[in-house]
Image (cartoon, rainbow, N blue to C red):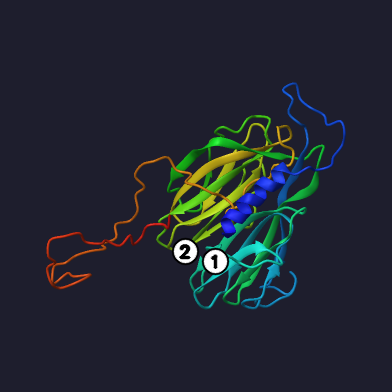
Amino acid sequence: MKKRWLAAAAVLVAGSIVPGPAPSPTSAAGDVTLGRVSLTAPIRVRDTRYSGMGASGKLAADTPVQLRSGVVSFTMSGMEAAGTADVYPCGGAPAGDPTVVFKAETYHARAVVSDPSAPPLCLVSTQPFHLIEDVLGSVATTPFAGGLQYRALATPQRIYEDAPDAGTTTTLPRGAVPSTASGATYLIEAIDPSEQGFVQAWGCDQGRPEMALLVHGTTRVSAIVNASFGSASSLCILSFRSTRIRVTLLGYLTPTGPDPTALPPTLVSQQGQLDAPGLRPISPVRVLDTRPSESLVADTPRAAGPVGVRHAGLPRP
């Protein structure tokens, strides 16, 4: 329910009547040269691990905390037991699948785009945790000259899938991002990682940030990344583990387009399967063996008929 609500919210924002300058400057194609998004270098605004970065100490379990407005990445750490966390409109209640499912002593990063014309977003966890917040841009209530608007690709484009050397910067192809764009939005996935690590992502013509936009344990993790770069540049990534990384281009940010209110998606509102049909390899996981000496299920042969097989190791649909 929560995912559907957020997706619907994006549609409502895109279709709302937003007062703005009149007349609006337009291109020859009739697109509006206005937008609501500004991307900036990452700025850390809260880190509860240190007293100099806001209130220090872990945040309490089951107590909502309001996230900053704009294009924001947040990281959770220090959970001493397994649990879940939800992002939802403040004043409401979490519903549906949790935004984050975590184990003890793990890190988890997510990116959100908070619309100031909608209710702010709150984060609540079932376990006490440390919160790290980094602001990567701002979102205006109304479109303005010089602002950026999001244009989604009709079909998401996979631009990279490989296991880069740990600690080595990899420059990705620009893909379908036009030269007029000022940045792009990506889905970055750590595929079947074997150990905890993190991935940094940034515009190659910008300085590499200290923050990580994707943090993974030993299960598959996805993160939305909004990166700014110039007309001749693209996205750079650096993984601190030799983990297989997949990067899919979802859309781009441009000063000119058909919808000046359009905002990039967040991971909790991204819907649908982004991969083309086909085989997705994972590390082999034995889920059934009826031999007595090797049994994972039963020590006695089964009569003829269907046998249910678990889908261990596979992501939830």
Q: Please provide percent x and percent y for residue 264.
A: 65, 45
Residue reaching furthest top? 28
Marks 1 and 2: in contact by CB < 8 Å?
Answer: yes
Residues packed near mark 1 inside 10 Å, few (<14), some (14 to 19) or many (20 plus): many
Query: Which three-letter amino acid code belongs to the residue tagged 2?
Result: Gly
Residues 233 and 251: in front is 251
Tell me the quarter of the picture where residue 178 sits: top right
Q: Which mark is residue 217?
A: 2
Q: Residue at x 48, y 71 (%)?
A: 103
Of the two numbered discs 2 and 1 on the same chain, state the one appearing first in sequence: 1
Query: How many circles with numbers are drawn on the protein?
Result: 2
Q: Which mark is residue 277?
A: none
Q: Is residue 207 visible?
A: no
Q: Residue at x 73, y 42 (%)?
A: 261
Q: Please provide percent x and percent y for residue 100.
A: 54, 64
Is 209 above or below relative to 178? Answer: below
Query: Which three-letter amino acid code belongs to the residue tagged 1?
Result: Tyr
Q: Please provide percent x and percent y for residue 45.
A: 73, 62
Tell me the quarter of the picture where residue 56 sits: bottom right
Q: Please provide percent x and percent y for residue 308.
A: 25, 62
Assign the N terminus to one quadrant of the image: bottom right
Q: Tell me the element at label 2.
A: loop
Tell me the quarter of the picture where residue 19 sits: top right
Q: Which mark is residue 107?
A: 1
Is 219 above or below relative to 206? Answer: below
Q: Residue at x 78, y 36 (%)?
A: 34
